[in-house]
Image (cartoon, rainbow, N blue to C red):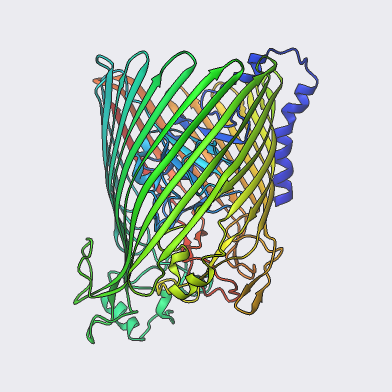
């Protein structure tokens, strides 16, 4: 089925209910348009919102194998392109998410209101959701494809915003134990204890140990993780405490190029555990089909230690006034390791460990209030964060193969070291106006943002200095109008600004001379988003259709000038604008009490609007497609539920993706199919419930490129030589047993 047919089919599915409604009576009450009719297992279209919002329920999140990232579950939503080279979507070097052509660094993410930063691998201002919360403890997800709520604590959300919410402690005491085993020696053990409610206090504590071998090559992936949440509540106030700790160790998959994949195959990986072959390659003595130093290294690893804590106080001061105060603290210690031949340890060992080392210590506070007046709900708040981020590049000498996993200390060579002091201030004011007995709603407001980044160069030639991104008035406006029972129109307009990045890839990644040249004229990236749409809802179906246009200005570009592993300083500049236009549709049909059919389709055209100069050379990118921005995405899932039996099968089509700015190199489109089945027994012996589940990833065992851009993008690569791709996981099986007491 070609792209045109897919688009026509999905739009027809979305519009069919509208044609039916056009022939029915419009005799409806205001409440019918404001109160959504819920399907049992899925509610995704965001009824009542003045902007495009999609939602995932607990049932959606629990359908996947335990440990699956909620980002992977989000990939079936319209506008979302998510890829990862592991089956769970949790291997952070490879995870990539784009929404309407905006990449992960241009999106916003929060957990229970706590800012997670941009969740990038070399993070400078947050942490990945897979480390912030266990998948079993995530209760729901809300995705705003165009613009998050004006109160969202993010300084990167030029595009969409994903908000994750953890579950509340159970009011009844309980114990939950689950065990998963599967392909590639996968094992995952989960334990959670709920205290139940006593005198207004309830809590849970959860822990997990997960381990799996790589599906190709050699090396383990391990994670130890704990979550705890406690709630103390009265009739007027509630105090919520949340804590999370994560210790994560990943062995990396090797990066491929188009050319190396053709020559070496889909299953090619790093040399480990073949130490001698790695030594020979470092000396230029290649074997097999290898012909390049960058075809493989001995191994790579990623280590991340995180501790996160938050305290939230909610006070219903009166029937009209609600107050909230959120405070949080986060610390991170991370190290990316590569055993590479770019520096010899000795004449006998032409390989050393090259590290990029990260540390983050940040704290913040978000006070806010909401005041309900006659037909108005006025909300206001402030976000302040202080973040100290450390970054360094080091080499460590080796005498033998680096088979143990640990944090390296006391380097033999320091390449660079920087400290970043990042101060964030954001405020917002918004008014929700309800008119015509609730049929018409309007959200009108603005926010102001100021982020100051001060870099101190401690070792090496990277830049130090100060740079500020500031805009005191970023407006947002939205309308929702109820047409009739279960149908509504919506429209929104939003302006956003993205702060300059500290850390490994921001403007301070250049030399001091280069930074001094561009710092005074560099502009922060901004976006203007306009979207229009319609939602339809009955007992039998839910549907939505949205169209949008986004103007993305002052695009910042760091141009890679060497192999990604070398990490040489890059130039940094504003290189023009991007225009994105598109349409998104969702259709969920409840064929019977047991059968549901979910469909989403997205068409997005993101194009560079102007050429730019690289030195004195004009780079011709005007009218070219944005990298890693598929034009067409289509997801379909059929689910069945009867008694204790649940089954589902779903497919996702991802269009071709360009991997150069001039569009002379790309990866092909692909289909990916996943499936699962489970059976639950209630009140079985001593257990409240018992659930046995089987999940199958990549059911058709498709070979495909999952991640693109693992080592960034280049201007032109017609021969496909850039090592910036990762292949997707093959067919894998996972069996889980879940016991609740």
**Furthest-right residue in this view:** 23
In the rendered picture of this protein, how many numbered marks are placed on residues?
Answer: 0
Of residues 202 and 596, the one drawn nearer to the viewer in this rendering = 202
Q: Quadrant of residue 172?
A: top left
State the residue at coordinates (55%, 28%).
Answer: 43
Residue 686 in the image: state x and y as whole percent: 23, 20
Above or below, 570 against 143 in this view is below
Q: Quadrant of residue 664?
A: bottom right
| Left or right, 263 with reference to 418 | right
Residue 464 in the image: state x and y as whole percent: 40, 67
State the residue at coordinates (44%, 14%).
Answer: 318
Residue 500 seen from this side: no
State the residue at coordinates (62%, 50%).
Answer: 527
Of residues 685 and 258, the one drawn nearer to the viewer in this rendering = 258
Above or below, 153 against 405 in this view is above
| Left or right, 511 with reference to 9 | left
Of residues 513 and 552, the one drawn nearer to the viewer in this rendering = 513
| Left or right, 191 with reference to 697 | left
């Amino acid at each position: 089925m070609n792209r045109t047919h897919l688009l026509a089919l999905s739009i027809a599915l979305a519009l069919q209910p509208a044609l039916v409604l056009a022939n029915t009576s419009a005799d409806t009450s205001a409440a019918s348009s404001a109160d959504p009719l819920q399907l049992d297992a899925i509610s995704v279209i965001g009824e009542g919102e003045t902007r495009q919002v999609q939602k995932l329920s607990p049932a959606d999140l629990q359908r996947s194998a335990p440990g699956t990232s909620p980002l992977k579950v989000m990939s079936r939503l319209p506008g979302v392109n998510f890829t990862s080279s592991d089956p769970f979507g949790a291997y952070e070097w490879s995870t990539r998410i784009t929404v309407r052509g905006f990449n992960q660094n241009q999106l916003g993410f929060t957990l229970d209101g706590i800012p997670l930063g941009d969740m990038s691998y070399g993070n400078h201002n947050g942490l990945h959701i897979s480390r912030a919360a266990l998948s079993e403890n995530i209760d729901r997800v809300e995705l705003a494809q165009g613009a998050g709520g004006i109160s969202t604590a993010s300084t990167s959300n030029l595009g969409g915003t994903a908000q994750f919410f953890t579950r509340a402690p159970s009011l009844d005491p309980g114990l939950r134990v689950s065990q998963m085993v599967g392909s590639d020696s996968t094992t995952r053990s989960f334990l959670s204890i709920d205290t139940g409610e006593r005198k207004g206090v309830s809590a849970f504590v959860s822990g997990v140990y997960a381990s799996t071998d790589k599906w190709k090559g050699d090396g383990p992936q391990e994670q130890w993780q704990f979550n705890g949440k406690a709630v103390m509540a009265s009739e007027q106030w509630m105090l919520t405490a949340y804590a999370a700790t994560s210790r994560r160790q990943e062995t990396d998959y090797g990066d491929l190029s188009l050319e190396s994949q053709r020559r070496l195959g889909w299953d090619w990986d790093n040399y480990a555990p073949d130490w001698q072959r790695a030594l020979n390659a470092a000396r230029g003595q290649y074997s097999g089909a290898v012909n390049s130093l960058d075809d493989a290294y001995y191994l790579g690893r990623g280590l991340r230690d995180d501790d996160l804590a938050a305290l939230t106080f909610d006070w219903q001061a009166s029937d009209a006034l609600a107050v909230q105060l959120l405070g949080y603290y986060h610390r991170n210690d991370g190290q990316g390791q590569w055993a590479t031949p770019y520096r010899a340890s000795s004449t006998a060992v032409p390989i050393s460990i090259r590290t990029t080392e990260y540390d983050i210590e940040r704290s913040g506070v978000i006070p806010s209030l909401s005041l309900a007046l006659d037909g108005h709900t006025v909300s206001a708040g402030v976000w302040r964060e202080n973040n100290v981020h450390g970054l360094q590049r080091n080499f460590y000498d080796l005498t033998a193969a680096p088979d143990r996993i640990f944090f390296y200390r006391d380097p033999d060579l320091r390449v660079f070291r920087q400290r970043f002091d990042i101060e964030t201030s954001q405020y917002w004011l918004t008014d929700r106006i309800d008119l015509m007995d609730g049929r018409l709603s309007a959200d009108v407001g603005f926010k102001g943002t100021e982020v100051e980044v001060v870099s101190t160069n401690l070792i090496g030639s990277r830049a130090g200095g100060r740079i500020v991104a500031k805009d005191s008035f970023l407006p947002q406006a939205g309308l929702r109008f109820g047409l009739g029972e279960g149908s509504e129109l919506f429209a929104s307009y939003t302006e956003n600004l993205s702060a300059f990045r500290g850390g490994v890839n921001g403007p301070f990644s250049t030399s001091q001379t280069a930074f001094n040249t561009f710092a005074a004229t560099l502009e922060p990236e901004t976006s203007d988003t306009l979207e229009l749409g319609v939602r339809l809802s009955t007992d039998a179906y839910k549907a939505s259709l949205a169209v949008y246009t986004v103007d993305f200005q002052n695009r910042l570009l760091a141009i890679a000038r060497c192999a990604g592993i070398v990490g040489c300083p890059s130039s940094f500049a504003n290189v023009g604008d991007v225009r994105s236009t598109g349409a998104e549709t969702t259709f969920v049909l409840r064929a019977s009490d047991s059968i549901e059919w979910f469909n989403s389709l997205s068409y997005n055209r993101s194009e560079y609007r102007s050429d730019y100069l690289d030195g004195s050379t004009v780079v011709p990118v005007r009218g070219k497609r944005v990298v890693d921005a598929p034009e067409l995405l289509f997801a379909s899932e059929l689910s069945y539920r009867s008694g204790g039996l649940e089954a589902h099968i779903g497919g996702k089509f991802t269009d071709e993706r360009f991997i150069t700015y001039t569009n002379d190199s790309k990866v092909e489109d692909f289909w990916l199919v996943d499936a699962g089945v489970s059976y639950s027994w209630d009140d079985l012996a001593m257990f409240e419930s018992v659930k046995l589940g089987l999940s199958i990833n990549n059911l058709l065992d498709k070979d495909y490129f999952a991640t693109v851009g693992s080592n960034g993008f280049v201007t032109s690569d017609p021969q496909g030589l850039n090592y910036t791709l990762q292949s997707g996981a093959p067919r894998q099986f996972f069996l889980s047993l879940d016991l609740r007491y």
